[in-house]
Amino acid sequence: DAQSPLNPGSVIVEVNGNPLPKDQVRFSAIDPRTGQISFTATADKDGIVQVRVSIADNPGVDKPSNLGTCSWSYEVDTIGPVAPTLVAVDCTGDEVTTVTGVAEPGATVKLIRNGAFYTEVIADLTSGAYSFLNVPLVIGENTFLAIPVDVLGNVGTPSALGKTIRDKVPP
């Protein structure tokens, strides 16, 4: 009946070709005027998720009539990027240095200088190369870490610790 409100039992949700059990689909809203539904279905692993939602007129029978279908896909990514490489000049008398490396393309790379956040850059979208120019150095040992964060906000493993020594004493 077109005037009847849609009931959750009429909705079949498939994820990657497998029907989800009704207890794994939580309906947050069904608009009886438009038939628009809102629901939450959880994905159990990273990767491409293909979702298909069908509305059936006879839920509970082996082969209900399909009144409508909608399909879409999205990517689940909960894993942070791998550790970037980090290169810092070993020893310098300069007041500043350049820190370079390679990270996941498009990742934000946060530079930790002497244990504290200093700044961040976006790694090249193709190569993943990044550079921090004119990074100030203190006299003595300076340490650097690069921490990658992918476009979805997943924090990756930090780089190996880089060290630079600023020496004002001439050789």
Image (spheres, rainbow, N blue to C red):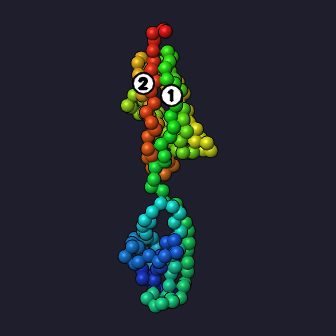
Helix, strand or loop at mark 1: strand
Q: Measuring 44% from the left and 27% from the top, which residue is drawn there?
A: 163
Measured Cα–Cα span from mark 2 to mark 1: 10 Å
- The answer to whether 39 is drawn above or below residue 80 in the figure is below
Label 2, residues with CA under 10 Å away: few <14, some 14-19, many ≥20? some
Q: Nearer the viewer, residue 39 or 74?
A: 74
Residue 74 location (% of width, % of height): 53, 63
Helix, strand or loop at mark 2: strand
Locate residue 25 relative to residue 121 in the image: left or right. Answer: left
Residue underneath mark 2:
142
Locate residue 126 relative to residue 23 in the image: left or right. Answer: right
Q: Measuring 54% from the left and 45% from the top, which residue is drawn there?
A: 104
Locate residue 142 relative to residue 97 in the image: left or right. Answer: left
Q: Measuring 53% from the left and 63% from the top, which residue is drawn there?
A: 48
Question: What amino acid is at disc 1?
Answer: Ala
Residue 37 location (% of width, % of height): 46, 73
Question: What amino acid is at disc 2?
Answer: Asn
Q: Residue furthest front?
A: 171
Q: Nearer the viewer, residue 36 or 99?
A: 99
Label 1, residues with CA under 10 Å away: few <14, some 14-19, many ≥20? many
Residue 167 location (% of width, % of height): 45, 15
Residue 153 location (% of width, % of height): 46, 49
Q: Is there any visible trace of residue 110 in the rendered image?
A: no
Q: Nearer the viewer, residue 69 or 20?
A: 20
- The answer to whether 87 is drawn above or below residue 58 in the figure is above
Residue underneath mark 1:
88
Q: Measuring 37% from the left and 76% from the top, which residue is drawn there?
A: 23
User: Disc 2 vs disc 1: Cβ atoms closer than 8 Å?
Assistant: yes
